[in-house]
Image (spheres, grey):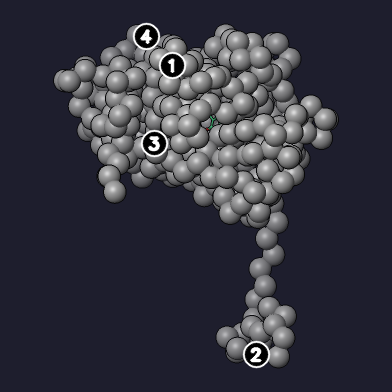
Amino acid sequence: MTTWHGLIDSDYRRWLPVTPDTPSISLGEGNTPLLRSEHLSGLTGCEVWLKVEGANPTGSFKDRGMTVAISRAAQAGAEAVICASTGNTSASAAAYAARAGVTAAVLVPKGRVALGKLSQAVRYGAEIVEIDGTFDDCLRVARELAAHHPIALVNSVGNELRLAGQRTVAYEIVDALGQAPDLHCLPVGNGGNITATWGGYRNYREADLSGGLPRLWGFQAAGAAPLVHGKPVADPRTAASAINIGHPATWEGAISARDESGGLIAAVTDEQIFAAYRMLARRDGVFAEPASAAGVAGLLDRHARGELEPGLRIVITLSGNGLKDLDASLRDGYTPTETSAATGDVARALRLAA
Ligand code: F0G
């Protein structure tokens, strides 16, 4: 068995913008499980695989790009980095910055970030500012501060380092399956991940390593679906807080990924997202955060509309870990059964036969 040391020290290094002098600031990210979903395969008549990005060190796909961004920031001698975030980017930036001995400043929309993500940033020692506004406001301020102060922006907007790292998800999928899937479904918020995923498939294809390109199907929450409507949403609203974004920074990249792949970007309701969220945990044993389930919700929606050809090989990105948002989980239905510590009482509570 070979040991995994993270993306920069893996075979994927040659795809990453690092030099021999770049320090490897890593938490062992990447190499996440690709699990076959018997349940979704059965429902759709396709071969459905789940790329479990919540298994990354801070619990989301953001670690793939952050290892590159923070390693390069450290190489450049940066003392501080800044990002705007709906939660996962801030958790990841804070962790990698801690490991590099760099200060992380994170701007988050007040009251709209899952507590698990916020507590990660707290624990990793980030400087946290909760802004009275949306994610889009946070990103505007972060960009302005980075332009005028000695602090490096580590959002994926225009950040080739982050995107290069995030492309590795496609390399791993092609290497695991032996070829590119027919279709790849994923949630879309700021647009960086669909852009990077497409870029990864294209890189492998151009290097003759993949034998094909998938269609990309991206899904936004209905209350925060600017790419679907073709215009920004001033007051985005979805309980899938990670993708509660009204003005995606990587707009063109997302649209190009959609069009070049012959795919689509469509909306799914919060009800559909939460139904998929419950189904993933209950039927596949994968606890993904609500936003992560948008790709599953979208696939099932297209299937219900009769728009999914049977027999396709499909990969769905599950972008973040369900443990990050326990409020969402418990709000969604948990009534404790309480008993005394008498075995008989517990047996009755469990309706066990005598
Ligand atoms: N899924 C999760 C769990 C996310 O955290 C995000 C984005 C996305 C999907 C969408 O990816 O923005 O590249 O289209 N989270 C960012 C953040 C915005 O700040 O953590 P995208």
Residue under label 2:
344
Alpha carbons under labels 4 and 1: distance apart: 39 Å
In the image, which is nearer the foreground, mark 2 or mark 3? 3
Q: Nearer the viewer, residue 166 or 213?
A: 213
Residue at disc 2, secondary structure: helix
Q: Could you tell which of marks 4 and 1 lies nearer the N-terminus?
A: 4
Q: Which mark is residue 147?
A: 4
Mark 3 Cα shell of 10 Å, populated few (<14), some (14-19), many (≥20): many
Amino acid type of the residue tagged 2 in the rendering: Gly
Looking at the image, which residue is at 69% across and 19% down? 264
Looking at the image, which residue is at 30% across and 41% down? 4
The answer to which quarter of the image holds residue 9 is top left
Residue under label 3:
30
Q: Against 283, is 92 above or below?
A: above
Q: Could you tell which of marks 2 and 4 lies nearer the N-terminus?
A: 4
Task: Give the percent coordinates (x, y) of residue 219.
Answer: 66, 27
